[in-house]
Amino acid sequence: MLKTIAGFDRIGEENAFAVLARATELAAQGKDIINLGIGQPDFQTPDHIVEAAIKALRDGHHGYTPATGILPLREAVAADLHKRLNVETNPDNIVIVPGGKVTMFMAILMFGEPGAEIIYPDPGFPIYRSMIEFTGATPVPLPIREENEFAFSADEALGLISDRTTLMILNSPANPTGGVTPREEIEKLVKGLEHHHDLAILSDEIYSQMTYDGMEHVSLLSYESLRDRLILLDGWSKTYAMTGWRMGYSLWPDALIDKARKLAVNSWSCVNAPAQYAGLAALEGPQDAVTHMLEKFDERRKLVVSSLNEISGFSCRTPKGAFYAFPNIKKTGWKAKELASALLEETGVATIGGPDFGILGEGYLRLSYANSAENIKRAVTRVSDFIDDNKKA
Ligand code: PLP
């Protein structure tokens, strides 16, 4: 018997990938599947970005790059942060990583060990808890509540800090709820964090450019008082429809940047060179494809919310960010994961049960509306008919 370290008995998964695999299998059997499960834009990566990668290959960019990424790309990230957030950053504090997820992997590895506590949002991206458990640290869930429009509460977050807390993970705009935490709440949190100098903060801002109804994205990077302990996670996957390119970036404080670089050297060496040139074209090129995508997401958001609210037993708040709806299904009498599974098997509609994002996700489904309006309409009709035919309550 091979005996691996105990962490592997605790490591979790991202069930969205299991649902994607099952949906693909059913589609291969000829079933008509509508995928509202996996969180990725249904748009193609814009042409000029694809062309930049092809050109990079033709120009001979086939070799290793610096472990933290090519300098022009790190400079472009710094310029983009300046343009969007009006914040000065040093390209030397930026690491290009193979996907946004890698930043959380690195940060949790840096701060997780038995005896440490790590605060993370629940419901939230499942890999936070999975990796915390892997390291042996104690996961401390920060409840994300529907009655608070799925924003996090600064008081609650601050109240969870103990002298063992090493890292606090925050995510706005959020997966799986679409919640966006407003400025007043963020400012309250930042004020409170000023009393906790030894606490690292991981701010997952992968949906930073996806907000609606005039809701602003407030980056934790805007607060000077956090700069010596803030790790920023962002990337190209969602904004530029580049999930399969595996392109993300993180910004590290001076105290951590060399550790982050060493982790890169010890694992992936550097991100795929042509993908880095594609990332550069994405940041420096025209942004109209991003605007177009957001307009489409906004239309679909309105459509998905209004149609979900017509389903008996469903009630859905209007999400202000990302591309997820998180309807409350408690009144249907169904358990969320059972319902998600029945919907996929019986109706061909892929969704994710709320408990895949944490204990507080029970009673909710996550639907990604990164799909065509026509498919959203067809999917919601199927869900509605299924609920009418399979009453539990
Ligand atoms: N953070 C959040 C909140 C996400 O929802 C996702 C992807 O779904 C990621 C990070 C990871 O993004 P990437 O695909 O770039 O690894």
Image: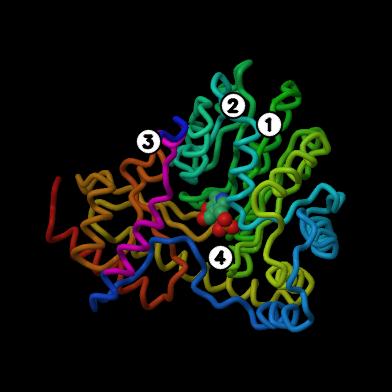
Quarter of the picture containing the N terminus is top left
Q: Residues within 10 Å of mark 4 (few under 14, many from 20)?
A: some
Q: Is mark 3 within 8 Å of ligand 1?
A: no
Q: Nearer the viewer, residue 28 or 297?
A: 28
Q: Nearer the viewer, residue 371 or 255?
A: 255
Residue 305 x/y as whole percent: 40, 61
- Closer to the eye: label 1 or 4: 4
Which residue corresponds to mark 1? 188
Q: Which mark is residue 359?
A: 3
Which residue corresponds to mark 2? 155
How far, Cα to Cα, is label 3 from label 4?
27 Å
**Picture residue at 64% right of the left edge, 30% below the top:** 111
Are the residues at dot 1 and dot 2 in contact (C-beta closer than 8 Å)?
yes
Are the residues at dot 1 and dot 3 in contact (C-beta closer than 8 Å)?
no
- Tell me the amino acid under the disc marked 4: Thr
- Tell me the amino acid under the disc marked 3: Ile
What are the residue bounds of the magenta stretch? 7-25
Q: Is residue 23 magenta?
A: yes
Which one is earlier in the sequence, the residue at label 1 or at label 4? 1
Q: Is residue 157 magenta?
A: no
Q: Nearer the viewer, residue 316 or 117?
A: 117
